[in-house]
Amino acid sequence: MNLDIIIEVVSVILSLAFLVLLMHENIWCWSFGIVSSLLSIYLFIEAKLYSESILYLFYAVMGVYGWWVWNKRKGESMPVVKWPLNKTLVGFGCGVLLAALLGWYFKTNSDAENPFIDATTTSFSFLATYLEAHKVLSAWVYWIVINATSIWLYQSRGLHIYSLLMIAYAALSVLGLYQWNKKFKSKVL
């Protein structure tokens, strides 16, 4: 079996563990996410998806940050929250701006494949990862759209196992949105 395939399979298994543990608000999700992200960086460089490589480095760093944020509550469960409209609009605007800048950079300065789509999924993944570290409910909405788009992006670059992972992620993101929304509503009532 090809080393790239082995790395892809191991990374996908760890990624699924991350998402399931995240949905259940288990702090151990972050350790699975860190290791999976570090393995993924190599694969995305090989596939010429450079924005994705940057994203997965960010995921590894955010894994440490997420662990720290969730851990500092000392046994208390961190509540699921909603961002107000002004914060949501600022976050979305920053995502659009970063996507445009990254896409332009990789289009003009590299041999990147699909640089604007790659940059858009990357940019909004930065935002969604930050939101999930703070248990902001809308993180799941971003993930549903990002994961659905990534199915095609990864398939187009021959990353078939990652494409299957994105199908599972899209479905699990819908479930994550449902679970966190239920938890948010129980807190509000």
Image (cartoon, grey):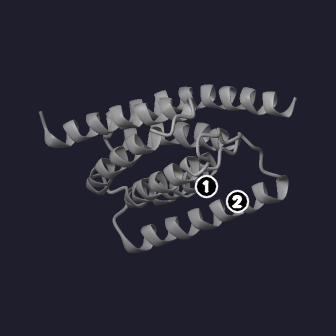
Q: Secondary structure at mark 2?
A: helix
Q: Which residue is mark 2?
A: 91
Residue 127: numbered disc: 1
Disc nearer the start of the sequence (1/2): 2
From the viewer's side, name the closer residue of 182 and 159: 182
How far from the left and from the top, in percent, is residue 112?
37, 61
From the viewer's side, name the closer residue of 107 and 176: 176
Q: CA distance from mark 1 to mark 2?
A: 7 Å
Quarter of the figure with residue 164: top left
How far from the left and from the top, in percent, is residue 83?
78, 50
Left or right, residue 32 beside residue 70: left
Residue 46: numbered disc: none
Q: Secondary structure at mark 1?
A: helix
How far from the left and from the top, in percent, is residue 17?
41, 31
Instruction: Indicate whether 98 appears above or below 31.
Output: below
x 49%, y 29%: residue: 20
* Residue type marked 1: Leu
Left or right, residue 34 beside residue 88: left
x 50%, y 40%: residue: 27
From the viewer's side, name the closer residue of 82 and 86: 82
* Residue type marked 2: Gly
How far from the left and from the top, in percent, is residue 51?
43, 60
Quarter of the figure with residue 41: bottom left
Q: Quadrant of the C terminus?
A: top right
x 72%, y 29%: residue: 183
Disc 1 to disc 2: CB gap under 8 Å: yes
